[in-house]
Image: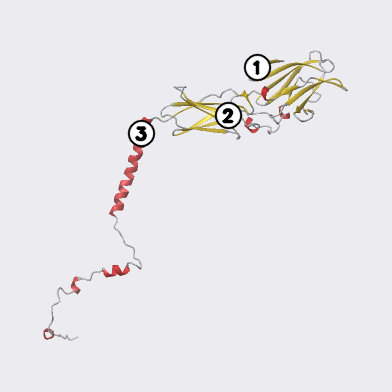
Amino acid sequence: MELSTVGLFVVVALLITGSNGTVCYAAVESLDLRCLLQWDCPHASPNTTYTVQTKTQGDPWQEVPWCVWISSRSCDVSPAFSNFELYNMIRLGVHLRPSSTAWMRPLKFDYSDFTFSPPSVSVSLKEDHLTVEVQFPCATNRRCSLGRCCPISELIHPWTTVTVYNKQNHSEYQRRTVWTQEVVSHVEFSGLAAGQNYCAVANFSFPTFSMAASPKSSPQCVQTVSQSVLLPAVCLGIGLTSLLLVPLLAVFLKRPKHTALTSENQPEILASVQVPDSLVPLSPVPVDPCDIQLEFRDI
């Protein structure tokens, strides 16, 4: 068996021989949970047809409906697999005659064959807290509807590793590894120095086989606010707040105090009411009745 890498694909090429001596060269290409079977049977006639079957651990062999009695030399069996924690097998059948099929020795398709595209990341900064969002590449599988991106994280729960490092000083970095159970992974970092440029990269791996890992994403960078910019902004904010509060405080202090009238303090208030001076004698001088004169006016 020959193992080679073509681009990001893992190609497992195998010389397989059928029960009647038929020789074919078959290869499985895998990328982002895709499984493409390709073959070449040098001694087969151009009119030879083929059938592909798959088998998941514990289940019987089943024909791939779109790869039955075909004349092409490839078959995308990705939608045929749904459980990647188990061993999956593929075999090729060569139809020599309408009633005779030579089955080639099966090929395996499991986590050791997996390769992945790098994820993509985006970053958002709030003060010294950095949030990294990791999005995963699209996969091809029968559990995904056609015509839309089906992220790998919908099919497996990968281990996601995010590294945040100082662009000017790579020895300053933080790294977190999380078990992703959501379609998009969010990883948070804190304690970043002010006025520095930080970059984030991420990659992920198959949950039970860490060697099946993706390359790192392209870095996304952001600059934290420097102290020289932050301090004047804080001072300006304090100054503006003071300008608004001082007039309000002055108006509040100048307002007269009013005492609410209640049933409890009403007697005290009434008792404190002063009678005009003209109605109150200045001193208790005795008056002689003879000094009192009565005057009558004609009306």
- Around disc 1, counting alpha carbons within 10 Å, would you say few (fewer than 14), some (14 to 19), or many (20 or more)? few
Q: Secondary structure at mark 2?
A: strand
Q: Secondary structure at mark 1?
A: strand
- 270 relative to 117, above or below: below
Residue 69's x, y, as percent? 81, 24
Identify residue type, mark 1: Thr
Q: Nearer the viewer, residue 12 or 8?
A: 12
> Marks 2 and 1, Cα distance to the nearest angstrom?
24 Å
* Residue indicated by mark 2: 160
Q: Nearer the viewer, residue 33 or 236?
A: 33
Q: Earlier in the sequence, mark 2 or mark 1?
A: 1
Element carrying mark 3 = helix
Residue situated furthest right in the rendering: 99
Alpha-carbon distance for marks 3 and 2? 37 Å
Q: Circle 3 is placed at which residue position?
A: 231
Which residue has dot 1 on it?
5
Residue 99 on image: x %, y %: 88, 23
Instruction: Out of 45 and 105, give the one closest to the viewer.
Output: 105
